[in-house]
Image (tube, grey):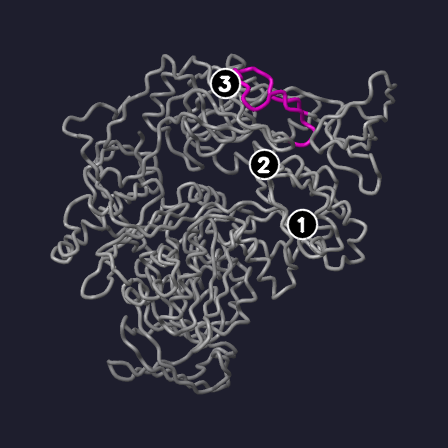
Amino acid sequence: MTGLGAVPGIADTMAWLDEVPLRRLVEAGLEMSVPLPPGDRPLVEPGTEVVPGDLLLEHVRDRRVAEVDVRTPDGDRPSAGSRWAPAPGRRRHADHPGDGELLAPVPGKSGRWRLVTGEHRAQTASSVGGIVVEVRLGAMIRLRVEGLAIRGAFAAGASARGRLELATDPFGDLRPGGIDVGRTGSILVVGARIDAEALTRARAMGVRGIVAASVAGKDLRDFQASERRQRAALHMPEPFGVLALDGALKRPIATPVAALLERLAGHEVALLVDPPALVFDAAGVDLPDVPPDWVRVRSGPNLGAEGRLRELVGLRRFAGGVHLEAARVDLDGEAPMDIPLADLERLG
Amino acid sequence: MSNPTRAFATIDRGTATTAVALIGWAGGRHRLLGATAGPVGVPESALLERVRRRAMAADPSLLESIGLEHPGCAADLPRLECATTMPPELAVVAATERVVKPLAALAATAGWHVRPVVIEGSEILKVATSLADRHVDAILAGASDPPGADERNLIAELGTLVAATTERRPDLVTVLAGGLASPGARTEQLFRPDRPGPTVLAPSPLDDGGEPLRALLDGLRGGRDDARRAIAAATASLARVLRRRVEVLEIGQSGGSRTVAAWQPGVETAVRTALVPRAALLPKPFTEADLDAVIGWLPVALDRLRLQDRLREMATAPWADAAGDGAIVRLASVRAAAARLLEATPAFDAMPAPDLVLVTGGAWLAGPATAAVLALADVARRPGARAVGMDHARVLAPIGTIEDEDERARLLADLRDDMLVPLGTIVLAAGLRGARAAGQLTVHGTGGPLDVDLVPGGVDLVDVPPGEHATVELRFREVVDIGVRARHIALVVTGGLGGLVVDLRDAPLRLPDRLEPRRELLASWQGAVWPGFDQ
């Protein structure tokens, strides 16, 4: 690993460093949400503690609406969102609905309600441990996640869990041929970028997730279209997600993040889609130290380069005749250069 | 202020930018000591210290006189603060498209992201799922008053679906408008009276041009010290101070706003405002049409997919990649956003034309001042003459949080020359025909008279420095529209960083459909006003 050694003389008294945008290396107490559309049945309630693999909800894959008579002898009016099932012992016909969730009364028909029901149901397990904070019927389940999280820029697919494996170095690209069944069940770190073809191959090989520094918009859209087709199939595919740590333009994974991912290799981690993050159990994992003056170029001509901050230099004129607040940076051992402050980020 | 504080800070917390300014009492009035801004996440104390440090370097005796000579002391100053948050989402539901459209258009100017939902022709499950979606913060349900023939048999369905949604989410704010709010409709009886969320009976969107309903929806957003509402309050005070009609166009990451305040002697200043999330620099969702709009304003060729990726990065890090063609992309995005803002507020164009247009929001600062003036002239195509300024220190919104109108006006009167950067004056004439010289312009300034040929389709820049006034005589061969229809007109214009911009292009602006000639044309205009444009 380069560029992460301690720097003598750089003290935390450098308050001016605050002017350079800071990104957290890890976050605790992340909250995630799981969609719960009308018809899906929550299997947890607020306050429930869940561990990875615990069931969160029952998902109806072929949701449809049926009309049912909900009149009861005591005349109670049910409420929308409550569960309804046919009276026990009643004969079921193929065209009669099974159990489901009451959607709304049928206007003008006393005692008749619309019911969301379906034949094909699948149970969704939690990819993380945590506490259920909220169950909003017809909308979502919200969990406070246990463990630490590396935040990403965006994610697609479904939240998944697996063993973290490093497939390339932080600068690398993973080609489709580089993924085989030996990666089944893993969450792969693939370096700088991955394309749609490699993503679909990874999913086909049983990989559970991909972590890359960047995913181009076109590849993301192609993957999402493919994912929608997969989800529409009769058999539910295993959950598979892709997490872009930094954005859409190609750059290597930041050195401190790569160092942390190296330490997490072989550990079980969870890839979350909403919010985009990689969650891990902090026990037994040392977080890398990041010197306070370490910076990375997060955008602009030197995208992805890393270096050390020397000083703030105030307003400087840059290409296009624009004036921006800047800092002088020793970039990857090159001569010092002035870079707009907003193009830099610190990790801490 | 009646009991002036020696110094205080203003803080404008946006969704992308934190802007700070230091204001001190010196020479018997408030003065702007300095201002700066940084990406969200940079501590306010660091930004305030940057301003203090620079002010100290420029005028140490002034800072000593108001007690700001010590490092770190600016962080402890009293503050005027305001904030912008991401817009909440409003599901606008009605029986038919005919009813949803005007309701949605109105709600879209009240600071809400709008999700239109139509009952007619939709699957009930889709409608119910959409209303219950976790991103929905409130529901506006409406009907014509009395309900039209096309919606009568769907009104009951509409009521039961909305009521069922509130049973799932009892805290959901629900607004009933038009026919659903009329006493005969009894729609509110469908809602459980003991639920915690309110059911609000709202005025019809047809009442007073929809302004009462818009104001109600804006109020429901909550947000104490909301920066966009504060801009509206400050604009009214500024119009009173300047005794002018003032328009403020603000473009930000989470939305845009347009406020017009018309001062008239002896009567209360009339103010109209619209807060439009779709007028964000990069609106959410960012559609292919939005991308086309940005590409349509680009004077350089950029690969479409690559541009899309750059804009995606700009959405997550709005301050990044601001140099080089990043600045050009930003100003193209500003034009597209301002065009959406103007398109969403057509009723404003029926009001008297403003004397002064102020632009605010960091995106306008992406290029030099002259480029900002041209960007405004490109999209605001109302014929006439208007001065253009910029709230460069972004103090307008924090000052708008002062509740007392007189106090607000006094502070603005003190600060007006410090806080408003004069960008120049735009003179826009419409109705010119042909390619030959359409007339002559004579500028009577401090440097003596200057004659310029007026050529239709072009933009002429005349140097009138900030702080100077010049008399401009326009003599056309034919009658043109310059706010009034005339052939010969004389105006007094104020100078600015961009000077006088005489815009004789079409109104509305007609650009070639093919991208290459379109880019060449845009580049020729921008190259003339943007030093370093082609670097």
Magenta stretch, residue numbers: A37-59
Q: Residue tagged by mark 2?
A: B134
Q: Residue tagged by mark 1?
A: B141
Q: Look at 41% across and 15% down and name the residue there.
A: A265
Magenta portion: prevailing SS class: loop
Q: Local crowd at mark 2 within 10 Å, few (<14), some, or many (≥20)?
A: many
Q: Tell me the number on the disc at residue A129.
A: 3
Is A334 placed left or right of B331 in the picture? left
Give the SS element for disc 3: loop
Say whether residue B271 is magenta. no
Alpha-carbon distance for marks 1 and 2? Answer: 18 Å
Give the SS element for disc 1: strand
Whether A264 is drawn above or below B111: the answer is: above
Q: Quadrant of the C terminus of chain A?
A: top left
Is A43 placed left or right of A148 in the picture? right
Same subunit: marks 2 and 3: no
Q: Look at 60% across and 21% down and name the residue there.
A: A44
